[in-house]
Image: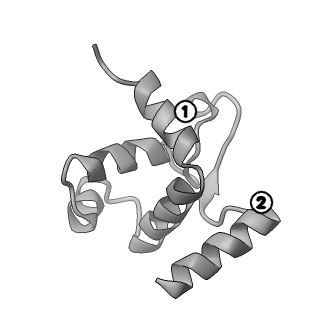
Amino acid sequence: MQAIQLQLLTQCLGNNWQGIEKTPRVCGAEARIAKTRIPVWVLVEARGLGYSNADLLTSYPTITATDLANAWVYAEAHADEIELAIERNEVA
């Protein structure tokens, strides 16, 4: 847990999110796993529905455990942003 907290602090101070990208016109400029079209909010929502890291790695074979760790750190630091993205993308 301390390693995650240290990574979070370092990335917040530098505004550098290792393994996470936001690009205009790609996935609506949402935070996503670098070099993919997998938004962080999708992973967070899946985890909230009960998917484990192993389930996510099976469902998204192009990402790694490190990608998931980066996504969780980003989501923790930007909880409001992620929650808003989930709300915007909910199906009525």
Within 10 angstroms of label 1, few (less than 14), some, or many (20 or more) residues? some
Q: Is residue 90 visible?
A: yes
Lateral position of residue 9 relative to residue 2, left or right: right
Q: Is residue 31 above or below residue 56?
A: above
For image coordinates 53% across by 86% down, the residue present is 2
Q: Is residue 81 above or below residue 89?
A: below
Q: Tell me how many marks there are.
A: 2
Q: Position of residue 15 (x, y in %)?
A: 77, 60
Q: Are marks 1 and 2 in contact (CB under 8 Å)?
A: no
Q: Is residue 68 above or below residue 34?
A: below
For image coordinates 54% across by 85% down, the residue present is 3
Q: Which residue is mark 1?
A: 27
Front in this rendered view, residue 79 or 51: 79
- Helix, strand or loop at disc 1? helix
- Helix, strand or loop at disc 2? loop
Between disc 1 and disc 2, the foreground one is 2
The amino acid at mark 2 is: Asn
- Please state, as top left, top right, bottom left or bottom right, where the C terminus lies in the image: top left
Q: Where residue 15 is drawn, which disc sits there? A: 2
